[in-house]
Amino acid sequence: MNTTKSNKLSVLEKIGFGSGDAAVNVVISSFFLIITIFYTDVFGIKPKDMALLFLLIRFMDAVADPVMGLITDRFKFKGGRYRPYFLFLSVPFGIAVYLTFTTPDLAYASKLVYAYCTYILVNLMFTAVTIPYISIISVITSDPQEKLSANGYRLFFAKVAALLVSSVVPVMAEAVGKIDWSTFSIQNMTFVYEVFEKPNMALGYQVAMGVMAVMATLLFIFCYFTTEERIEHVTDKRPILEQLKLLIQNRQWLILWGSCLSGTVGYAIRTAVAMYYAKYYLGGDGGVQSSFLATGVIASIIAMPLSTFITKRFCKVKLFWISQLAVGVVSVLMFAVVRPGNISLAYPLYFILMLVVDVHAPVFWSAIAEAVDYGQAETGKRVSGLAFGGISFAQKAGMGIAGAAVGLLLDAFGYVPNAVQSKTSLLGLTLMLTLIPAFFHIINGFLIMRYKITDKYYEVIRAKLNI
């Protein structure tokens, strides 16, 4: 492998690297925070049908993610092995996001077909840019501290994008939906802004997510022009089954795979139901819904520098599993003390919960590249693209399982869109925000107790691989 260039990254390059995850998180955040309530309360899909949609599309990812990983392993372009995808696929990615949040005026069956088609498209575009993105950290630097620092930038910008999606999109959607567009004059550039009792939220989300899609496109282009691939790993051209066998032998990668799956299920259930919780359990309007989501995202943003601060003084692996077990404690507390409409307690406890949930994130995303190096050091054979593709699949499988679970649980607890909820339905919402996701985070914590690649251990790996 070529390591002649410096492993140190400039601040601009770290910002550029982070901008890529901001673009990715336009989709991830909308999937975590908005798409569930968009499908049920705006698009008009029944919870059971939504559950099946989320679950079935994940079977597609079982093929798409590994295939994209193999493509990145086998093909290299003039601009590098990973960077060119950010440039070439930025516009198709943005278009897919826009179409997903467009609500056509069709019969229910036709709308369901449209939802399947656009959800498949946005997931394929997501895979095509995300696999190269999560892989590029392995070729821009081999320094573990630089990787950790770059991932700190990455996750900070990811959370900023999540903050924009959570705080801007609901408010913008409601505001746009209240505009009487029939009075709009192109010649005079005037319109009448009226406060309708029921704003056109379908149009509102289409416009708001269209703005987010344009932003994502520009961020990917910026990422392409500000990053550089310095390290050239010799990739194996082995058949996919042989690569899968090598991955299964890599116990540290398997731990991370299980961690990603369990952690994503917990995280996705909680964030998917957060807007329902704010709207129905806390009885909030669009402003309350937006600010409640933003509270969780702000906590996640603060968790990024806090993680860097802690890991400079404390074992990153211990921070990882302790934080995940602590989620269970905070979740039990929130479930026990917050009652319907109790905003004054819900906000601070949700802030603490999301802070604890996300403090491990920079550690996890740094660990993937280190686990790949661990596998190479142990077997002498490197499996990179498929390893990153497998982690992406675990993340999206977790999102699919969580989405299906939320749909089925909403139906089981008797949820009725845009109506006064029963006591049973309200109980279901608070369970899905607290105790149910906490169960999966506790599983995550126990898994990471078995992970052994600390900074000290990774130095041994680097010495063995001469990187």
Image (cartoon, helix red, strand yellow):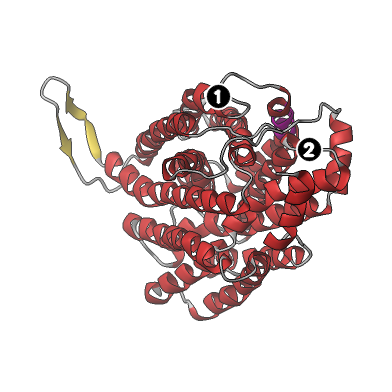
Extreme residue in the front direction = 4
Is the residue marked by circle 1 packed among few (<14), some (14-19), or many (20+) residues within 10 Å?
A: some
In the image, residue 83 above or below residue 440: above
Expressed as whole percent of the image width and height from the top left, the position of residue 148 reads: 57, 53
Q: Residue at coordinates 48% horizontally, 77% vertically from top-left?
A: 338
Residue at screen point 88% across, 33% down:
241
Mark positioned earlier in the residue sequence (2 or 1): 1
User: Is 443 displayed left or right of 92 in the figure?
Assistant: right
Q: Which residues are magenta?
A: 64-70
Q: Main secondary structure of the magenta part?
A: helix
- Which circle marks residue 84 in the picture? 1
107 displayed left or right of 55: left
Q: Amino acid at mark 1?
A: Pro
Between 218 and 94, the one nearer to me in the picture: 218
Q: Amino acid at mark 2?
A: Val
Q: Give the SS element for disc 1.
A: helix
Residue 330 drawn at (x, y percent): 56, 75
- Can residue 217 be seen here? The reply is yes
Residue 45 in the image: state x and y as whole percent: 54, 41
* Residue drawn where x is 36% and y is 38% of the image: 208
Alpha carbon distance from label 2 to label 1: 21 Å
What is the quadrant of the C terminus in the image? top right
Residue at which label 2 appears: 383
Answer left or right for 369 relative to 90: right
x, y percent for residue 146: 56, 50
